[in-house]
Image (cartoon, grey):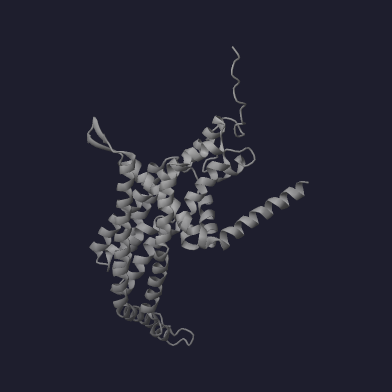
Amino acid sequence: MKAFNLFSSLASVGIVILLLYYGRDFLIPISIAIVIWYLINAIASGIRHIPITPQKRIEIPSWATKIIAIILLGLAVTLVGSLVSDNIAQVSKEADSYSENLKKIFESFQDKYSFANLPLVNISDLLTNLDLGSIIGSLALTLRSIAGKGVLILIYVLFLMLEQHRFHDKLVAMLPRQRQRDHVEDIIRAIASRIQTYLRVKTLVSFSTGVVSWIILLLIGVDYPEFWALIIFLLNYIPTIGSLLAVIFPFLLSIVQFGTLLHPVLTISLLGTVQFIFGNVIEPKMMGRSLNLSPLVIMLALTFWGALWGVTGMLLCVPITVMIMIIFSEFKKTKSIAIMLSADGIINPITDSDDPPLPTEPEKKSSS
């Protein structure tokens, strides 16, 4: 019997993974829309109470805060799209000079270490055939294909915003028992609270990291500092690997741009210091225990969702894992999995008991 249960569990997991992989064209836009919906709610809750003085605040209506949040997010996306397209076009124009600088660097390296006469090391010919312009053009096509799904994602977001106000009524119809309904609503609120906290803190930290990195790149003289600051901002949403790539990309550009050692060393040292301070000192203090995810679990989730959904999966791995941990913590059979996913082994179930609340019988009216 135990062997059968184990087999059925493994089969169920395998089916779910196959559905996630083969249904990614359908699931990825919906997942992005849900995260954007959470982000809109996080922005809306952040601007709902505007302080005039330390003692007085203006309370903006909920519908108005959501409209403001959508406008702000729309302006940010428009700015990002414009900046990316403009800078990719400019980098394409400079691709030939970058290729020439890279060729000179490798030729100098070969001459210095006597590699020039080795038959298997013919880097000059390799770099002659290297067309950076076509590589950058391929990157632009990839970004355009992602942007092509923007309309579908926007439609999903709008429907989520409309359904948000009707969800409680549907929940009442689905779960007439008060205890059951309260339990489900508490789980949903816990998921929303943690994901909104994560998105709010991550966005603020990533934005601050991008601004400081932009100042550093501007002072060093690296080309297109605004573009790289934007890339650093976006990459910081990818746990661990994103911070590493955010340092490596400007470092590689500084090598082909300057052709000297000083500027690349300055670039990687200063950007690495910024990433360490914001990622390992400031962000954990701001995040507190709102996530409570094990770093190993985050890396495994990054690998798993990256293999299933590519870069989009890497961006969404933390919110998805937070949802899984909160839901698993509410049931006796899966609570041990939630403990393994946590950073310190301490989970705070929404209910006090190990099992979800049982339905209660309706109270009988007295016949008096």
- The answer to whether 159 appears left or right of 260 in the picture is right
Q: What's the residue at 64%, 54% (across, down)?
A: 13
x then y, percent, for residue 313: 49, 58
Asked whether residue 281 is in view, the answer is: no
x then y, percent, for residue 187: 51, 38
Indicate the quadrant containing the C terminus: top left, top right, bottom left or bottom right. Answer: top right
Asked whether residue 192 is in view, the answer is: yes
- The answer to whether 192 appears left or right of 342 in the picture is left
Instruction: From this view, report whether residue 83 is shown above or below residue 273.
Output: below
Q: What's the residue at 37%, 42% (across, down)?
A: 286
Residue 247's image quarter?
A: bottom left
x then y, percent, for residue 346: 53, 37
x then y, percent, for residue 288: 42, 40
Residue closer to the observer: 299 or 88: 88
Residue 53's image quarter?
A: top left
Q: What's the residue at 43%, 60% (across, down)?
A: 152
Instruction: From this view, report whether residue 67 is shown above or below residue 79.
Output: above
